Image: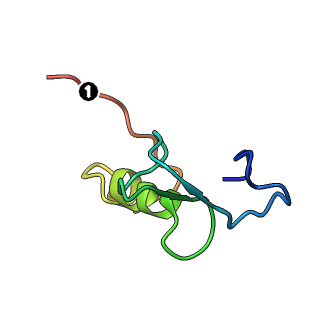
Amino acid sequence: MVSDPLNTTNLANFISIGYDRTDMDLDGNIIYQGPGNERAMQLYNTVLSHPANTSFLANFIVREHLP
């Protein structure tokens, strides 16, 4: 993450170590940009694969629904 205190050169593909709410696959590595990044996984798993997103729009709004 760019905001990681160890990322002193502000690299966009810096890998932060540790578990955080942004660590989607819970592997202890937080990757903002580059191969295996967390944002792409979130986009696919929550937005593009949502059953109501029949047009596969990247800007589809997912509304929370509690049972």
Residue 24 placement (x, y as % from top left): 40, 52
Front residue of 33 and 11: 11
Which residue is at a point 45% across and 50% down the rendered structure image? Answer: 23
Front residue of 45 and 11: 11
Please tell me whether residue 4 is drawn above or below residue 31 in the rendered image: above
Furthest-left residue in view? 67
Please tell me whether residue 4 is drawn above or below residue 39 in the rendered image: above
The local secondary structure at tag 1 comes to loop
The image quadrant of residue 65 is top left
Color theme of the render: rainbow
The C terminus sits in image quarter: top left
Which residue is at a point 42% across and 61% down the rendered structure image? Answer: 41
Please tell me whether residue 35 is drawn above or below residue 13 in the rendered image: below
Front residue of 54 and 64: 64
Furthest-bottom residue in view? 35
What is the three-letter code of the residue carrying label 1?
His
Instruction: Please rate how many residues cluster around mark 1, counting C-alpha atoms within 10 Å: few if below 14, some from 14 to 19, many from 20.
Output: few
Residue 58 placement (x, y as % from top left): 51, 58
Residue 66 placement (x, y as % from top left): 21, 23
Please tell me whether residue 20 is drawn above or below residue 15 in the rendered image: above
Furthest-right residue in view? 9
Q: In this view, does 3 lie to the left or right of 24?
A: right
Q: In this view, does 57 lie to the left or right of 6?
A: left
Q: How many marks?
A: 1
- Label 1, on which residue? 65
Q: In this view, does 47 lie to the left or right of 50?
A: right
Residue 35 placement (x, y as % from top left): 54, 76
